Image (cartoon, rainbow, N blue to C red):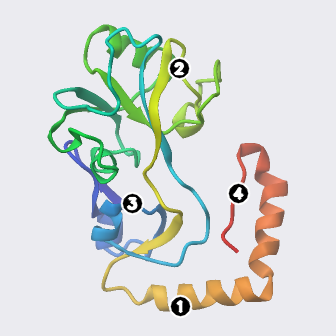
């Protein structure tokens, strides 16, 4: 495991895999939590981690996305759309909110069911916004917006690009950053990204930082 994900906070510590030396580094999206826990390379891909608060369609509970004081917010285990992101974005009440953390297996039914059972007032998550009626078999971060649920409030960026994360006492970044810069200067990195978009673009755009 590269990053530790606990029951009360996400991504606040390096995982067992990194700390035990099972591997030297892993690709991560940069967040304020990861910066405290690990050393990060130069950015090699853009990935903003756009996230939204979601409520039942029509917002029957009159949820106010600008003031979440005293509200219970749902979060998805392992995603970078964390309570810390809301705090960093300075959403009013984020530093004192109550939250439930869960793993959604079937987004199309689990999220609406949790709303019906009043387990939370809103859920904070990163999805491919505006995609309705998506295939939820492989939901994940590109699963689309579940039926009966709608986004509310501003788009909140929880991440700042993709980096190689290593232990803070590692020397790997000296080699990695130098090699990455040489690849960018020579045009080899641009060519790798071009081929990757051709071969794998159907799964989503690969937005390289050239």
* Apparent side of residue 104 relative to residue 63 in the rendered image (left or right): right
Which of discs 2 and 1 lies nearer the camera? The answer is 2
Q: Which residue is mark 3?
A: 31
Question: What is the secondary structure assignment of the residue under circle 2?
Answer: loop
Total numbered labels placed on residues in the image: 4
User: Going 31% across and 81% down the picture, which residue do you hit?
Assistant: 168
Tell me which numbered mark, 3 or 4, is placed earlier along the sequence. 3
Foreground pick, 53 / 29: 53
Tell me which numbered mark, 4 or 2, is placed earlier along the sequence. 2
Question: What is the secondary structure assignment of the residue under circle 1?
Answer: helix
Tell me which numbered mark, 1 or 4, is placed earlier along the sequence. 1
Q: Which residue is mark 2?
A: 146
User: Going 34% across and 24% down the picture, which residue do you hit?
Assistant: 122
Q: Which residue is mark 1?
A: 175
The Cα atoms of the two marked residues, 1 and 4, are separated by 24 Å
**CB of mark 1 within 8 Å of CB of mark 4?**
no
User: Going 55% across and 72% down the picture, which residue do you hit?
Assistant: 43
The Cα atoms of the two marked residues, 4 and 2, are separated by 25 Å
Question: What is the secondary structure assignment of the residue under circle 4?
Answer: loop
Question: What is the secondary structure assignment of the residue under circle 3?
Answer: loop
Tell me which numbered mark, 1 or 3, is placed earlier along the sequence. 3
Q: Position of residue 52 (x, y in %)?
A: 45, 35
């Amino acid at each position: 495991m590269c990053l530790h994900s606990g029951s009360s906070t996400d991504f606040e510590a390096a995982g067992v895999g990194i700390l035990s030396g099972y591997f030297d580094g892993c690709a991560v999206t940069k967040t304020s939590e990861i910066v405290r826990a690990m050393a990060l390379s130069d950015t090699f891909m853009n990935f903003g981690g756009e996230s939204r608060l979601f409520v039942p369609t029509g917002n029957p509970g009159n949820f106010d996305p600008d003031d979440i004081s005293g509200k219970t917010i749902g979060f998805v285990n392992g995603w970078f759309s964390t309570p810390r992101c809301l705090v960093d974005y300075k959403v009013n009440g984020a530093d004192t909110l109550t939250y439930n953390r869960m793993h959604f297996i079937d987004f199309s039914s689990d999220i609406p069911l949790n709303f019906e059972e009043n387990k939370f007032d809103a859920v904070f998550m990163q999805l491919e916004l505006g995609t309705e009626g998506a295939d939820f078999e492989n939901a994940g971060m590109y699963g689309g917006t579940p039926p009966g649920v709608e986004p509310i409030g501003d788009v909140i960026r929880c991440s700042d690009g993709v980096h190689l994360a290593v232990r803070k006492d590692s020397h790997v970044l000296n080699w990695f950053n130098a090699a990455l810069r040489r690849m960018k200067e020579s045009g080899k990195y641009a060519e790798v990204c071009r081929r990757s978009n051709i071969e794998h673009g159907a799964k989503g755009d690969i937005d390289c930082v050239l």
